[in-house]
Amino acid sequence: MKITSAKFVKSAVWPNQYPPASLPEVAFVGRSNVGKSSLINILVGRKNLAKTSNTPGRTQLINFFEINEKISFVDLPGYGFAKVPHSVKKDWRDMIETYLGQRQNLALVIFILDIRRDPNSDDLSLRDWLSHYNIPYLYILTKSDKLSNNQAITRKRVIEKNLRTSSERKTILFSTKTQKGKSDIWDFLENHLNSLSLQ
């Protein structure tokens, strides 16, 4: 997709603060420090649209972006970070689950995992939660440039086995450094959104 415009709309915590649900939304979720913001920036060709940080847990709000005046990207707070109080973890979990459970124009969840890490209990819980509520999602394995091609393929298979991924569910390898997987993600997004518009 050719990106003609990409802008930050607003940050929010609870539904009464969300922007109007006028565009199909694609939400980006994953453990802290898996590269959600970097993935968004690469997809839209903007270096600093979504703020990145080396500190896990830095994204503490739900951030909404408008792409080409046709799609909304939503950067959700990362989960599974260790260096914040339990009460903060609970608030952030509630924030994420409220958004995912109540946002009527949510079209797809981009479920991001670090290819070097096995899925943990938080990842598995999110997978079960999305499946239970029939929310469509796509697995993206980031940081694939950190491994050789053979290592990346092996890790992909291990992660898919841990996630009990069916052969129909696509898993895309991605690298911020090389932009590997960028066109595959856009192809999937466009096909998915087109299929929704035909329903």
Image (cartoon, rainbow, N blue to C red):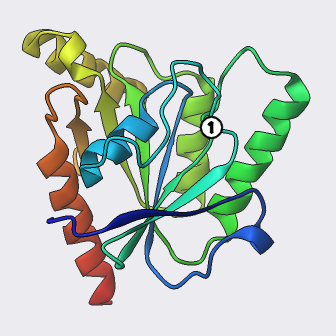
Q: Quadrant of the C terminus?
A: bottom left
Q: Is residue 40 left or right of residue 4?
A: right
Can residue 137 be seen? yes
Residue 133, relative to residue 129: is it above or below? below
Can residue 165 be seen? no
Front residue (pair 131, 31): 31
Amino acid type assigned to the residue bearing label 1 in the image: Thr
Q: Sort mark 1 into few (<14), some (14-19) or many (20+) by Cα contacts within 10 Å.
A: many
Q: Is residue 172 left or right of residue 178?
A: right
Front residue (pair 191, 26): 26
Image location (x, y in percent) of residue 6? 35, 63
Residue at 67 percent across and 21 percent down: it is 81
Q: Residue 31 is drawn in which quadrant?
A: top right
Front residue (pair 105, 57): 57
Residue at 79 percent across and 21 percent down: it is 84
Residue named by callout 1: 59
Image location (x, y in percent) of residue 29? 51, 44
Front residue (pair 101, 134): 101
Furthest residue in direction bottom, as rendered: 198
Residue at 26 percent across and 90 percent down: it is 198
